[in-house]
């Protein structure tokens, strides 16, 4: 990735603030002063606190469940507009007993079409990451069309969301893995 793009992503990272809304727990919230995007992250044992935070705000978004299985890091990506109930469904799923942490990228403006698109984009990134095993859940949903402008806005949300996820502790994913970062890198290389 060209130096200029790496520097820009670093500057975005400097704008991130991380809060700990419930002392004595693993719950943490990463946000920035640039967007309405936030990442809430916690150990799987603190899932009820994550659910309470989400229920209070009623934000939609995309989540990544992370843990270890057979000596490798494993990730499950999902989405929802009622994440406070959706995540609770996963707690009882024996196929997800590998989960150790939960990361949720949310925004008050994410509607169903946005969350489906974000799930597709982040799933592609997770599947392409050789250090991760992808735990497939539901396939992509159909019937939530987005215009080109919405897709471009959501591509920016993926880039900035990966930055927030990284700041919140999900180090295996990087902002440079987003489609938008790769497009910018290609443009910068072409201009050089």
Image (cartoon, rainbow, N blue to C red):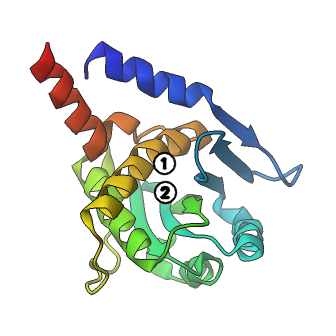
Look at the picture and state if 81 lies above or below 173: below
Residue placed most toward the observer, 49 or 177: 177
Q: Is residue 70 visible?
A: no
Position of residue 118 measured from the top left corner of the image (x, y, whole percent): 38, 63
Which quadrant, please, contains the N terminus?
Answer: top left
Q: Secondary structure at mark 1?
A: helix
Q: Residue furthest left?
A: 190
Residue placed most toward the observer, 147 or 73: 147
Q: Which residue is mark 1?
A: 161
Position of residue 55 measured from the top left corner of the image (x, y, whole percent): 73, 77
Q: Within 10 angstroms of label 2, few (less than 14), some, or many (20 or more) residues?
A: many
Look at the picture and state if 159 lies above or below 104: above
Q: Is residue 157 visible?
A: yes
The residue depicted at 83 percent of the width and 52 percent of the height is 21
Earlier along the polypeptide chain: callout 2 or callout 1?
Answer: 2
Q: Contact (CB < 8 A) between labels 2 and 1?
A: no
Q: Which mark is residue 66?
A: 2
The residue depicted at 25 percent of the width and 84 percent of the height is 142
In the image, is 149 to the left or to the right of 189? right
Q: Within 10 angstroms of label 1, few (less than 14), some, or many (20 or more) residues?
A: many
Position of residue 183 measured from the top left corner of the image (x, y, whole percent): 21, 37
The residue depicted at 61 percent of the width and 53 percent of the height is 36
What's the distance in space between the residues labelled 2 and 1, CA to CA? 16 Å
In the image, is 15 to the left or to the right of 62? right
Q: Which mark is residue 65?
A: none
């Amino acid at each position: 990735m060209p130096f200029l793009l790496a520097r820009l992503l670093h500057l975005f990272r400097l704008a991130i603030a991380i809060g700990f809304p419930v002392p004595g727990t693993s719950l943490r919230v990463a946000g920035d002063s640039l967007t309405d995007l936030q990442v809430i992250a916690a150990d799987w044992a603190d899932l009820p606190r994550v659910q309470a935070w989400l229920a209070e705000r009623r934000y939609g978004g995309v989540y990544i469940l992370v843990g270890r299985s057979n000596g490798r890091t494993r990730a499950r990506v999902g989405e929802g507009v009622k994440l406070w109930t959706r995540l609770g469904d996963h707690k009882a799923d024996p196929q997800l007993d590998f989960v150790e942490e939960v990361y949720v990228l949310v925004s008050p403006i994410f509607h169903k079409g946005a969350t489906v698109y974000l799930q597709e984009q982040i799933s592609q990134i997770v599947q392409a990451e050789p250090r991760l095993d992808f735990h497939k859940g539901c396939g992509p949903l159909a019937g939530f069309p987005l215009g080109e402008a919405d897709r471009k806005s959501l591509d920016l949300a993926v880039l900035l969301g990966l930055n927030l996820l990284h700041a919140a502790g999900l180090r295996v994913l990087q902002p440079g893995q987003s489609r938008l970062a790769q497009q910018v890198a290609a443009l910068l290389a072409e201009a050089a």
